[in-house]
């Protein structure tokens, strides 16, 4: 039943689609001999080729087909058979009958794979026609790319070889021999070309070339009428070989006399690279390579020319590989036969290839073409196009760096191998060459990827992810004037549009990974800031030193660090181990010394003939046996390789018809590497199962979960919103919601509450809607101010007084002050006077030291001039500036910054300063927009912090201020704050194999809807912007070992994050309801077991290395919210009781809530065990008390610790001899998130901390020295507290 049901499936990764033999038809050859006898072969014309034989899998003998249908499980859509033009076996005098009538065979039925046009295939296999030769020629190969109507590509490798026209010529070991027994009538000699074409869905150019080389060695030993058999055997072998899954495992297959290696793609998003990527670098100078890449990026009509057909495809494919992850979206026909030359007249962008003989013809006949001569390394344009083909230059700095890096590459294998002895083993020599090529390919990929990152890195700064908007106009303004033409053309292409979609979908491809790896410290810090960006003092200094040389930007964090956290001794900050930042360092021109990891290989078993069902099944059985042995010898923690073995074994099980075994192997990919999980194949497999099979599968819990997910859940990928909008100014009146969306799209500000205040400011005294002209004026005013800030140039003398991360946000007009004449400058830290005449620096005050700000007027001649007075704590003299018409605006701005700094200091939260800066710049834009008497009043609507300072007491209680160290905002840059659902601190590890950034301590923060953001806990800057672990709420996190963080989710899945790659490629799906807690044994540096629990009462023990469940049990009561490990037992909180269970699931004792709270209805919310004190601490729903039981006697009534002004306890943790309780309570009559610190020995509240404006949702400890608290969605911040 399984085998019958699986007949409609097709294996997704089979190497071979079809194999064909092509050549001149028999009739033409007979006529050719007659002409040759009369005229001589020198006057013979080219022949028209045709398909002589075609072989399409599966290859099963006819007599065996019935049995194969039941046992082979080939998963083919229809039964395919070989098609061949039948030839008669030669008679003793066959040469005499060549002119006789030919027999026309009836071809057998055959199903041709989509995308392969049998009418065009002969022309492509013989693009120059079938040219008869007077002597044998060298075998040669070329490569095809075939595209179907849907744009799907298949790839062909064509090997041409020559055979004598008559059988008197026989080939032995590749040498032609004359047989003298035949008549001398054919002394002239004719050699006719034939071609063998292999078509595959995968671009295995080098591997399939090696395969065909082996085949031709066999064909030369065969008579003309015998060639079909070895070709069919060859095709049958390839049809049974799967393409390796993405990753580090390459497949090796022995095809005498060579070992054939089929390389895997690096990851599921990457293309297969079976190319020598240095070929274009041998053909073109680096400057020309850049020109060709520009032609691709601007989507020109490109035609490659060469006298070598093979180079046309290989060079074009190399250039497309250089551009990854950008992809060519237009027609790609790398080889045009003589009959296809009219294709170059197509009006749209394309990429084609022609023989060099047609260069003049194409150049004269077609307009608007870019003609690239591979043989000469030149680029020209077709006639009448000098004016309308404008190929811009690549941005200068990126081009210079690329050229220098290419020049430093070692492109010649002979130089690399000069010191080596000659290898006497062909396969060994090939392996050496392959390893050298792999390293060179990796270096070239890194070089070209760095080029793309340096060109497009800043694109992300002009994207709005929520509304999927790219502000191309503003992006262009940030580019150098000389680069505008390049970017204007590139930004208007399909290729770039597809690139934008990937960025907006936050795809972590090679581009995104390199952008992250080479990110400067300044960019990393900017990721945590919500204020508008301005050039820092360091950037201004580097700009002044040279326009072409920019220093490394290593920024100092502008926020208080936790000095007490000990860091391991690492390399100095400026000795970064990061990859070279090509966008910011022209001097780093040497190519990276990239040493790719040696891939693993798996040798495919031999395939035995004849190809009958028993032989095929024996091959599959051998395949499974070898895979199983390899898995047995594999280290348990090598999940990357294990996943590839599971994938391959699952495919082979499918081919055997063993569907349940296949599903079990595919299900194991969740635990090893879910990226390569073949969802579509599994879905089709499940749908093909009969009812009994489905029932059998659903009896296995892991398969029941798999089947449910595959069939019941809609495919998320199909729901991805792929549209991209370019920002445009509105043309209609806007209400608040539409205005908010437009402002967010513009990139001015994202925070919804700030935009609401801006709306109020722009609509003061009028109807609550904004007209398009007002929005346009506001937008232009903002952008003009932004552009002016980019042009700020400070004298060296001034920059010496400023921190290198300071930015000038506002400059006044030239005014008179009591400190001299000049301009007042505002940074995020201070006010200073930029004196005129001899440029100088006079500090007015830091915002922290301001005591008073007043707007007054001063007498000058017969009138009063508005003036600003600032009283500074450390100075007796009051600063006075005659700001005239600017006075009121500066008064508002300085007060807002002063209030923001006061809040930042009181709450230890630098985000207040960043937010104040945003308010200040919006005030400036509002005044510039309205330009009316009421403009200042309108701008005052944005004076948010100054109003808070006046209306609400800003100072926190003394105890809170003393204990609070710092606050960070994981929702920075989001539209709304997001609740902090879970926190995890992981200590730093000094591992020579790690990057410096990986060795630092980290804070893992789980936000709403499965988002996880990672902070560098040594500087509290973003280490990794948010990535997703499912879409449900995260309940818990734990560090399972130094390489893994486990995340328990509401969706019942445990997600495993690799701490080095920051990727989530593993999932544990054994729970059937919400995962509520994860724990490891306390005190174990490298735990061997992790315990997990779920809401339905399931408790599982996991082996960390193998990810296998070692034990499990189920609590009958359900409602399991948390577990603790103590004394070899698991303490389980179920709401109604706390149960003490052995790790095997036997009940030892139970604390029932009803026995202690008979008069009220409540349930356990959280609990902690204090082994040193032999105590159990618990909190109950709706109660403001903590209850303490003695572990030795749970039946005794508990002690109680009352929490003053506490409304509800949410969470609690133990920190040394203290218990920290997170809650919702009251402070000065207003709801607040509060933390109570209780002394565990005296059972008294030591501290009452006013932590957040919203509920304290989660607590975690950082090495028992710091405690971190996360708040609800109203605030969405994390507080770092000093532990005692």
Image: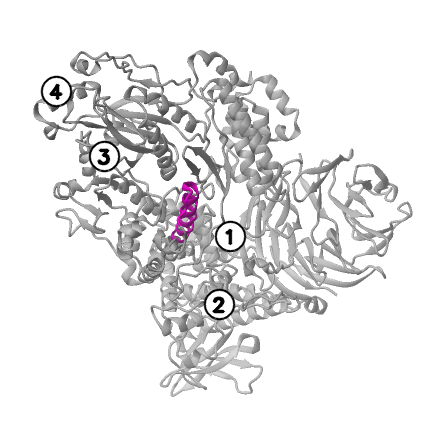
Q: Which mark is residue 34?
A: 4
Whichever of labels 4 and 2 marks the residue nearer the N terminus, that label is 4
Q: Nearer the viewer, residue 860 or 882?
A: 882
Residue 169 in sight here: yes
For mark 4, give the secondary structure: helix
Image coords of residue 555 (percent x, y): 50, 68
- Occupied quadrant, residue 710: top right
Residue, disc 1: 975
- For this rendering, which residue is in front, 586 or 1225? 586
Which of the marked residues, 4 or 3, is nearer the chain's N terminus? 4
User: In the rendered image, which quarter is residue 35 located in?
Assistant: top left
SS for dot 1: loop
First of labels 4, 1 by sequence position: 4
Q: Which residues are magenta?
A: 422-444
- Tell me the residue at 80%/53% (across/down): 1185
Q: CA distance from mark 4 to mark 3?
A: 23 Å
Within 10 Å of the Cα at label 1, are there few (<14), some (14-19), or many (20+) other Cα atoms?
Answer: some
In front here: 1200 or 157? 157
Q: Which residue matches tag 2?
A: 554
Specify whether residue 429 is painted magenta: yes
Q: Secondary structure at mark 2?
A: loop
Q: Secondary structure at mark 3?
A: loop
Tell me residue 987's x, y (percent). Answer: 65, 58
Question: How far is the residue under mark 1 from the one under mark 3?
Answer: 70 Å
Q: Which residue is mark 3?
A: 137
Can residue 1163 be seen in the rendering of this structure? Answer: no
Residue 25 place in picture, x, y as percent: 22, 21
């Amino acid at each position: 039943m399984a085998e019958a049901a699986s007949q409609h499936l097709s294996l997704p990764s089979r190497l071979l689609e079809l194999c064909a033999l092509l050549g001149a038809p028999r009739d033409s050859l007979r006529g050719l001999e007659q002409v040759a006898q009369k005229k001589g072969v020198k006057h013979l014309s080219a022949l028209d080729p045709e398909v002589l034989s075609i072989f399409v899998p599966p290859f099963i003998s006819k007599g065996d087909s019935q049995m194969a249908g039941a046992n082979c499980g080939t998963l083919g859509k229809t039964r395919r058979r070989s098609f061949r033009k039948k030839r008669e076996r030669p008679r003793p005098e066959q040469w005499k009958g060549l002119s006789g009538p030919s027999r026309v065979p009836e071809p057998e039925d055959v199903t041709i794979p989509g995308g392969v046009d049998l009418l065009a295939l002969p022309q492509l296999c013989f693009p120059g026609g079938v040219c008869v030769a007077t002597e044998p020629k060298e075998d040669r190969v070329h490569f095809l790319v075939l595209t179907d109507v849907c744009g799907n590509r298949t790839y062909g490798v064509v090997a041409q070889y020559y055979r004598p026209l008559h059988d008197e010529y026989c080939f032995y070991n590749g040498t032609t021999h004359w047989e003298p027994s035949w008549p001398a009538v054919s002394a002239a000699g004719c050699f006719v070309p034939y071609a063998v074409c292999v078509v595959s869905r995968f671009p295995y150019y080098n591997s399939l070339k090696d395969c065909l080389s082996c085949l031709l060695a066999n064909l030369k030993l065969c008579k003309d009428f015998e060639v079909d058999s070895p070709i069919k055997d060859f095709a049958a072998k390839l049809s049974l070989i799967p393409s390796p899954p993405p990753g580090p495992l390459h497949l090796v297959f022995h095809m005498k006399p060579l070992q054939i290696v089929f390389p895997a793609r690096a990851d599921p998003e990457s293309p297969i690279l079976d190319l020598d990527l240095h070929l274009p670098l041998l053909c073109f100078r680096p400057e020309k390579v850049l020109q060709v890449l520009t032609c691709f990026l601007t989507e020109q009509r490109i035609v490659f020319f060469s006298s070598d057909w093979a180079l046309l495809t290989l060079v074009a494919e190399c250039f497309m590989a250089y551009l990854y992850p950008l992809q060519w979206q237009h027609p790609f026909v790398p080889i045009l036969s003589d009959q296809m030359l009219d294709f170059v007249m197509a009006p749209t962008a394309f990429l084609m290839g022609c023989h060099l003989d047609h260069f003049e013809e194409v150049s004269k006949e077609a307009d608007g073409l870019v003609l690239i001569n591979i043989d000469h390394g030149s680029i020209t344009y077709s006639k009448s196009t000098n004016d309308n083909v404008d190929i811009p230059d690549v941005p200068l700095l990126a081009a210079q760096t690329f050229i220098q890096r290419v020049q430093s590459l070692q492109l010649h294998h002979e130089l690399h191998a000069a010191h080596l002895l000659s290898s006497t083993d062909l396969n060994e020599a090939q392996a050496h060459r392959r390893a050298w090529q792999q390293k060179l390919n990796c270096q070239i990929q890194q070089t070209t990827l760095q080029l793309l990152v340096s060109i497009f890195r800043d694109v992300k700064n002009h994207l709005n992810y929520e509304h999927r908007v790219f502000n191309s106009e503003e992006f262009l303004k940030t580019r150098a004037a000389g680069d505008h033409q390049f970017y204007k053309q590139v930004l208007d292409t399909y290729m770039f549009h597809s690139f934008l979609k990937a960025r907006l979908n936050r795809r972590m491809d090679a581009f995104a990974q390199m952008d992250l790896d080479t990110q400067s410290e300044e960019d990393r810090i900017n990721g945590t800031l919500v204020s508008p960006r301005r050039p820092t003092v360091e950037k201004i200094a580097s700009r002044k030193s040279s326009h072409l040389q920019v220093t490394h930007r290593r920024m100092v964090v502008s926020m208080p660090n936790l000095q007490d956290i000990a860091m391991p001794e690492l390399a100095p900050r400026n000795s970064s181990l990061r990859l070279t930042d090509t966008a910011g360092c022209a001097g780093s021109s040497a190519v990276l010394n990239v040493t790719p990891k040696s891939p693993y290989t798996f040798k495919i078993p031999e395939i035995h003939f004849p190809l009958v069902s028993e032989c095929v099944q024996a091959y599959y059985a051998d395949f499974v046996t070898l895979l199983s042995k390899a898995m047995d010898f594999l280290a348990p923690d090598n999940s990357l390789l294990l996943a590839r073995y599971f994938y391959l074994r699952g495919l082979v099980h499918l081919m055997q018809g063993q569907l349940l075994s296949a599903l079990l192997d595919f299900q194991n990919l969740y635990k090893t590497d879910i990226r390569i999980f073949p969802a579509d194949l599994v879905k089709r497999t499940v749908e093909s199962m009969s009812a009994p099979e489905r029932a059998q599968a659903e009896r296995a819990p892991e398969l029941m979960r798999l089947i449910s997910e595959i069939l019941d859940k809609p495919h998320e990928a199909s729901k991805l919103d792929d549209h991209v909008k370019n920002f445009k100014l509105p043309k209609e009146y806007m209400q608040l919601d539409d205005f908010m969306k437009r402002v967010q799209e513009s990139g001015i500000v994202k925070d919804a509450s700030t935009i609401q205040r801006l709306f109020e400011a722009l609509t003061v005294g009028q109807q609550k809607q904004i007209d398009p002209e007002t929005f346009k004026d506001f937008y232009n005013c903002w952008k003009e101010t932004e552009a002016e800030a980019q042009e700020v140039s400070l004298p060296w003398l001034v920059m010496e007084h400023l921190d290198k991360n300071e930015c000038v946000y506002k400059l006044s007009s030239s005014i008179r002050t009591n400190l001299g004449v000049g301009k007042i400058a505002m940074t995020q830290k201070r006010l200073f006077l930029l004196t005129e005449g001899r440029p100088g620096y006079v500090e007015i005050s830091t915002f922290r030291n301001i005591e008073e700000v007043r707007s007054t007027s001063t007498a000058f001649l017969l009138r009063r001039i508005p003036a600003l007075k600032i009283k500074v704590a450390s100075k007796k003299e009051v600063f006075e500036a005659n700001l005239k018409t600017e006075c009121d605006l500066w008064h508002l701005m300085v007060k807002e910054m002063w209030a923001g700094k006061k809040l930042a200091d009181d709450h230890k939260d630098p985000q207040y300063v960043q937010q104040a800066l945003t308010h200040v710049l919006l005030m400036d834009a509002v005044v510039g927009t309205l330009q009316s008497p009421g403009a200042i009043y309108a701008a005052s609507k944005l004076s948010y912090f100054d109003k808070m300072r006046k209306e609400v007491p800003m100072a926190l209680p003394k105890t809170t201020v003393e204990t609070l160290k710092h606050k960070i905002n994981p929702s920075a840059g989001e539209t709304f704050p997001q609740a902090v659902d879970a926190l995890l601190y992981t200590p730093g590890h000094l591992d020579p194999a790690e990057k410096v950034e990986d060795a630092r301590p980290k804070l893992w923060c789980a936000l709403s809807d499965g988002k996880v953001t990672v902070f560098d806990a040594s500087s509290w800057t973003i280490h990794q912007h948010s990535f997703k672990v499912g879409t449900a709420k995260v309940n818990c996190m734990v560090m399972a070992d130094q390489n893994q963080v486990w995340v328990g989710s509401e969706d019942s899945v445990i997600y495993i994050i690799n701490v080095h790659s920051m990727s989530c490629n593993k999932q544990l799906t054994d729970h059937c309801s919400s995962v509520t807690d994860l724990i490891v044994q306390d005190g174990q540096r490298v735990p061997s077991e992790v315990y997990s629990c779920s809401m339905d009462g399931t408790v599982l023990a996991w082996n960390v290395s193998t990810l296998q469940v070692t034990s499990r049990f189920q609590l009958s009561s359900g409602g399991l919210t948390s577990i603790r490990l103590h004394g070899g037992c698991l303490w389980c909180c179920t709401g109604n009781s706390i149960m003490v269970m052995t790790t095997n699931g036997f009940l030892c004792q139970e604390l029932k809530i009803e026995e202690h709270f008979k008069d009220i209805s409540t349930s356990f919310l959280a609990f902690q065990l204090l082994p040193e004190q032999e105590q159990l601490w618990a909190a109950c729903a709706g109660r403001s008390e903590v209850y303490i039981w003695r572990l030795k006697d749970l039946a005794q009534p508990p002690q109680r610790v009352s929490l003053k002004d506490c409304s509800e306890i949410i969470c609690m943790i133990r920190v040394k001899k203290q218990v920290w309780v997170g809650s919702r309570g009251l402070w000065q009559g207003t709801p607040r998130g509060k933390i109570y610190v209780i002394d565990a020995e005296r059972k008294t509240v030591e501290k009452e901390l006013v932590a957040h404006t919203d509920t304290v949702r989660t607590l975690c400890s950082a090495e028992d020295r710091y405690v971190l608290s996360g708040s609800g969605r109203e605030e969405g911040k994390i507080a770092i507290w000093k532990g005692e």
